[in-house]
Image: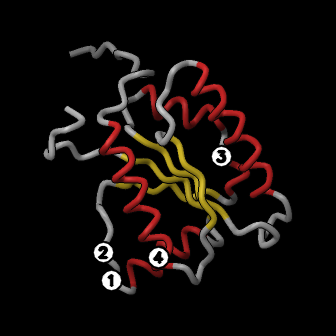
């Protein structure tokens, strides 16, 4: 199915309130075109993103995850973006160890004034995940009470 043009990946984006979310808002206000496949979760700081949230999203069938924060040195919480970068590096190593394809989890820096950059990152992440196909490596089947 990865070669199928009908596949529309589901991407979850954790965006820091101060910079990346504002950059996404600027992209929307500027009417910049980017894929609508992304669902945004606004967090106070990229450093607040728990790696377990990313694993849970992948377990529940999200095809890709983006974590985006302030540029180095511009974090409103001083070092939260550095904490996020370290956590994501460790998580990527873990995902690589369990056989997850590189590209399913991404990290970026976007400031409030970079709406164009945000739109470009969303396009790149979506295309990378689309090329990988549906993320089924960690998907956990959930029984329903129907």
Q: Which mark is residue 49?
A: 3
Q: Which residue is mark 1?
A: 31
In terms of secondary structure, where does tag 2 sit?
loop
Q: Residues within 10 Å of mark 1 (few under 14, many from 20)?
A: few
Query: Could you tell me which residue is drawn at 40 percent across and 29 percent down?
Result: 60
41 to 86, vertically: above or below: below
Q: Residues within 10 Å of mark 3 (few under 14, many from 20)?
A: many
In the displayed structure image, the side of residue 4 where residue 55 appears, left or right: right
Quadrant occupied by the N terminus: top left
Q: Residue furthest bottom?
A: 30
Query: Could you tell me which residue is drawn at 47 percent across and 81 percent down?
Result: 26
Q: CA distance from mark 2 to mark 3?
A: 27 Å
Q: CA distance from mark 1 to mark 2?
A: 6 Å
Q: Which residue is mark 4?
A: 25
Badge nearest the viewer, 2 or 3:
2
Q: Nearer the viewer, residue 109 or 140?
A: 109
Q: Which residue is mark 2?
A: 33
Whether the residues at callouts 1 and 2 have beta carbons within 8 Å, the answer is yes
Percent position of residue 9, x then y:
30, 44
In the displayed structure image, the side of residue 10 where residue 56 appears, left or right: right
Q: Quadrant of residue 45?
A: bottom right
In terms of secondary structure, where does tag 4 sit?
helix
Q: Nearer the viewer, residue 100 or 78?
A: 100
Lower sequence index among marks 4 and 2: 4
Q: CA distance from mark 4 to mark 2?
A: 13 Å
Lower sequence index among marks 2 and 3: 2
């Amino acid at each position: 199915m990865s070669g199928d043009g009908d596949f529309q990946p589901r991407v979850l984006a954790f965006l820091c309130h101060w910079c990346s979310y504002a950059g996404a808002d600027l992209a929307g206000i500027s009417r910049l075109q980017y894929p609508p496949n992304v669902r945004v979760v606004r967090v106070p700081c990229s450093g607040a993103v728990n790696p377990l949230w990313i694993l849970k999203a992948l377990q529940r069938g999200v095809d890709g995850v983006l974590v985006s924060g302030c540029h180095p040195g511009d974090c409103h919480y001083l070092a939260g973006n550095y904490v996020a970068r370290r956590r994501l590096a460790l998580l990527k190593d873990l995902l690589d160890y369990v056989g997850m394809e590189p590209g399913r989890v991404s990290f970026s820096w976007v400031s409030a004034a970079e709406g164009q950059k945000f739109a470009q990152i969303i396009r790149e992440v979506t295309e990378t995940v689309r090329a990988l196909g549906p993320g089924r490596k960690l998907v956990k089947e959930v029984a329903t009470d129907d």
